[in-house]
Image (cartoon, rainbow, N blue to C red):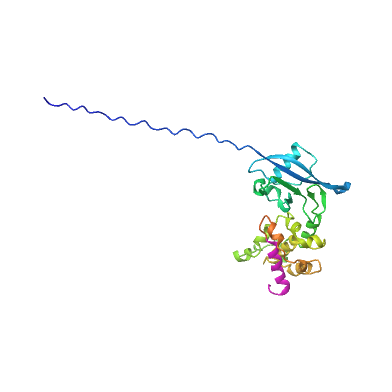
Amino acid sequence: MAAITASREEKPEPTKQTPPPAPAVESAPKTITLRISRSNPSENSAAKFDEFQIPVQKWTTVLEAILHVKQNLDHSVAVRYSCRQASCGSCGMKINGRPRLACYTKVSELDSNVITVEPMSNFPIIRDLAVDFKQLFSTHKKMKPFIINEGSEVQPGAKEFIQTPNDLEKFLQFSYCIKCGLCNSACPTMATDKSFIGPQGLAQAYRYTADNRDEGKKGRLKIVDQSHGIWRCHFAGSCSNVCPKGVDPAMAIQLLRGYLLGFRK
């Protein structure tokens, strides 16, 4: 009798289904103490600190913490801000003793449960965290922050000014200044000489002096070569340490001195 072999079809094992990922659980907000300097020179009020308990996340900026106070706890807090993306330079202040942009500084980066905000040093205080930029803008204007060139007017047959990458590299870094005032706030010479041009103005004087399209070098060098000008800088380097745009005013001042001393042309 012939043996009959029964073929058994192997059934595939059931596919193991991966369980759906668990929904992301947002971490609970952390509470910090925000100390805000309060003063109003127009009313001769003594400076004091008001403290607020603020919930923050890891992405919360110091500016957002201040605005939380202004919107929910104390509407009278005076603070200047605009773009919230480190472009306008409006929200400069001292944060835990160091000049910074509030919109560019995260609370989590400070590694502290107590955040102290104060108005920038070396500027007249308007109220609370807002300071007067009148002198900074006036000094900036004195540096003639524009291209001076008799042939810059558009005329028939005029051509564009050609610059090589090397020509651009000489001043590009110093053109990133957003006039936030942090460098002037950190400058020790500004603290002792209110008439000092300051690192912001001197850096911008170099920016245009180094531009090969410009013909105003002699005029600018005459402005900075005076008793409250470039020679009052003691090269502490504080200005470059706090610049949020990497302008490096200290290096600009040294390079500008090179023109005055004849090292550069």
Taking the magenta stretch, the answer to whether it contains residue 260 is yes
- Residue 162 appears in the picture as rendered: no
Q: Is residue 195 left or right of residue 88?
A: right
User: At 78% across and 63% down in the image, what residue appears?
Assistant: 189
Locate residue 158, reporting x and y percent: 66, 63
Percent position (x, y) of residue 85? 67, 48
Query: Which sits in the foreground, 157 or 236?
Result: 236
Count the marks: how many?
A: 0
Tell me where residue 65 sits by quadrant: top right
Name the image quarter holding residue 222.
bottom right
Residue at the extreme left of the image, as rendered: 1
Residue at the far top: name it: 1
Say which residue appears at 73% left-offset and 72% top-offset.
260
Query: Which sits in the foreground, 197 or 24?
Result: 24
In the rendering, at what x and y percent does residue 143 appear? 76, 63
User: The C terminus lies in which quarter of the figure?
Assistant: bottom right
Q: Residue furthest bottom?
A: 262
Percent x, y for residue 92? 73, 51
Q: Is residue 165 visible?
A: yes
Seen in the picture, residue 72 relative to 88 is either above or below; the reply is above
Q: Quadrant of the N terminus?
A: top left
Question: Which segment is the magenta one?
Answer: 248-265
- Quarter of the view holding residue 220: bottom right
Q: Main secondary structure of the magenta part?
A: helix
Q: Which residue is at the far front?
A: 113
Residue 83, magenta (yes or no)? no
